[in-house]
Amino acid sequence: MLLPLTVAFVTGLWLGSYTPYLPITVFLLLALAVITLTVLEVIGRLTAARSLALYGGLLAGVLYWSLFMWVAAGTPAVSQAGPSSVRIVGRVVEPVRHSPGRLVTVLALSSLGEGNTLRPAEGRLRLTWREPDRDVRQGDLVALVARLREPSGTLNPGGFDYAALLKRRGIDGMVSASGPGALSILEADAVPFRWWPWRIIDGWRERIRRAAETALNGPALGIFLGIIIGESGYLDPTVRDAFMATGTVHILSISGSHLGLIAFLSFFLIKSGCRRLPTVWLEGLSRHTTPTRLAVIVTVVPVTFYTLLAGAEVATVRSLVMILVFLIAVWLGRDRHLLLALAGAALLIAVHDPRVLFDISFQLSYMSVLAIALVLRWASREDRNGDPDPGLPRWRLGEWLRDYVWITGAVTLVTVPLVAYHFNQIPWLGLAANLIVVPLAGGILVPLGLGSAIWLLLSGGSTLPAGPLNQALLNMTAAVVEMLARVPGAEWHVASPAIAGIVIFYVLLFAAVRPSESRRIRWTGTLGVALLLIWWSWSPRAVPDGDTLRVTFLDVGQGDASLLELPDGLTVLIDGGAAYDTLDMGRAVVAPYLWDRGIRRLDHVIGTHPQLDHVGGLPWIVRSFEVGHYWGNGLPRDEVFYHRLQEALRARGLVEEVAREGQTLVGSGPCRLLVLNPPVSIPTGQSPGSTKAGGSLLNNLSVVTRLDCGPQSFLFTADVETDALFRLIVRGRDIRARVLKVPHHGARSSLDVHWIERVHPDSAVISVGGHNPYGHPAPAVLVAYARGGVRVLRTDRHGAIWMTARLSSPTIDIHATREELPEPVPVGVSMLHTERRNLARLWTEWVGI
């Protein structure tokens, strides 16, 4: 009964998550559940007690979600602070995560204020400290002066919502500090006693990290810290992409597979060792316990230690819970009931925090463990049903290899929809790559790395034991993975499948593997799964109709990225956002949107001018998509991001074509994309050969383009300032446009009221990052557009903005990502109207149309 009760409770949690947005629909579904269960009772398929228990579990899930979210809501810390910097005092309550030149942790806020005037405050803050000059541990009471802001991220159609992730993890606000001395530790000698065990573990982690930094380098350092202490910040993005392409990225962070391998090795060694004890010793042991139970007890120690050493992150603790529940089942002699153990683990995890249902790490780890459990149950059934000749030795290696191949295939198959949905990728190569990498990591790298770390802690030294051996083996692993990643088509990116399609996939997969079903049903399920995989792998682009135009202004934070999809199928990307140490907007925002649109070729890519917030994300785009032409303004720069872009162009056999006033970049078909800036002749002192070009020069020589498609017109102004705006006026070209991309993120230096009047747009889009340090958009700019009767949309408030129009109609339909999100339903006369709108929005998300 535990398994169906867990399913009912989890289903109730899922329904509960929609209660604020679809209360009437949820009520009707609950009523439908009553009717269905009653009918099943009448026809004798369910007993009254079982039916009541299932409905009780469903209703309990709905109520529990609502109660949990009400309790967890609390008082947002950000509402207690203004827009200026304040003094923040809080205690470190999570393990500190390091990367080169940065640390990240979570503070439990205790007080806020200005100067020495502090007032009590509550909330959890995510703290980022760049260039720190001291170590920070759990339990430290710290103080800093910083601006407190709400959790934020980019908001794009179907994109990753970082702000929502932080809120699900209980983060109320974000603060950042820079430079030595920016953070002070208060009461260093008066840390509460309950924090001392965690501080000891933090000290172990620091020693291991410092020893690894001394002994290892390159990919070996990042992989070692990732698989031993859970520090993923030292891993080079190119190495991570290679592991991602081969479906082995789970190796790089401590997950259920790592803990499972440690548990397996410990359990196997202890149990095998006990069986090889002298008979007298074994008889003495059997008076107190069995080898199996002793192995269970001993195995708890290394898996718990490994979890703590990894920082006891939520995802790792969830994996530990699943393993401990399984070990309890083994202790009780119920090891054949793996599904019941998994159901119990899921119930415990969901009760602790029901929001985990929407966490990708939980989804992947739980589905992987479920697949492993099903394969092991199938393998044990095959072994019991088999009748091998007792005179023939059983080939254990062959059986192990068979089971391992089945496990790898099953895990790859059941996680395909989740990986495709969250990462726009089908890791088909993982079936072969995991056969190589997982045994190498689980059998050699993790045991060797853990052994080195433990010996370091026991010996009290500062040098990592077996450092050269770790370096060689880790480098070899990275080289193998990078070689596999170069297999043609290894990195196969797709559009995110619709939620409805994912549900259908799992229903068909269940029908295909369920032994009790008829052969026809199983074959139908198998064929359906295969067809869905083929469709997802294809991810075709909508066929152009020759009439529809779509222009999207992506939310890339403080930067620009615009995509033009023309009626004849041509695509143009104007800029690609920035690329930082931990976030590449090209990889994280632009590329997923292109994949979701079915776009694998860009006919034109325009880098308006060589500044980080405009072309920083383009190298990843150029390397990952087929590009017809790349256009720039011809100004070189001696900057890392510029060199990275030039290397990417050379690697793809492209050269930067210089755009100049009067050029037509797109002239075939129904649309025309005309260059209005920079001028053909650049004034003296503004030579494109200058690598030390200043910001205003770069801005005023940005590539400005105007798109005309029948009655529709769009003006893309990059970062031009008043000098270039004046030049556009005196040149006498037609700069009128129905839609304007506001120059320079709405900066005051790009405000010219006369120019706005000449353009006379109906709508204007400001591509800008929230809480940016430049004060964009300037209040005067917003006032000027408001006085001109222009509708202003901002990516920091509206998220990505896309506009669709037809050549046969003067109408432009404007959509904003935030406006497509469901809103809580108020109690009152507008209740039904709001729910209908929410249902339409969610239906689009569920079915993908």
Image (cartoon, grey):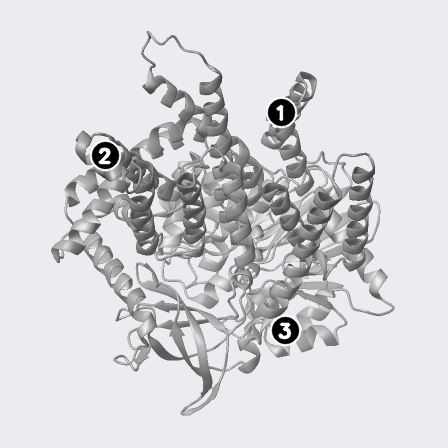
On screen, residue 202 versus residue 321, left or right, reads left
Q: Nearer the viewer, residue 122 or 792?
A: 122
Q: Please tell me whether mark 3 or mark 1 is closer to you in this view.
A: 1
Q: Is residue 353 visible?
A: yes
Q: Residue at x 37, y 80 (%)?
A: 143
Q: Residue at x 69, y 47 (%)?
A: 54
Question: Where is the C terminus found, in terms of image quarters?
Answer: top right
Height in image: 698 above or below 56? below
Say what amino acid the circle numbered 1 marks: Ala
Height in image: 573 above or below 771? above
- Write down the residue under mark 2: 283
Secondary structure at badge 2 equals: helix
Q: Residue at x 69, y 21 (%)?
A: 521
Say what amino acid the circle numbered 2 marks: Glu
Report the disc number at residue 48: none
Q: Residue at x 81, y 62 (%)?
A: 834
- Write down the residue under mark 3: 752
Height in image: 154 above or below 149? above
Picture coordinates of residue 629, whole percent (x, y): 53, 40
Q: Is residue 730 visible?
A: no
Say what amino acid the circle numbered 3 marks: Asp
Report the disc number at residue 512: 1
Q: Are marks 2 and 3 in contact (CB under 8 Å)?
A: no
Identity of the residue furthest to the bottom in this view: 117
Q: Nearer the viewer, residue 632 or 20?
A: 20
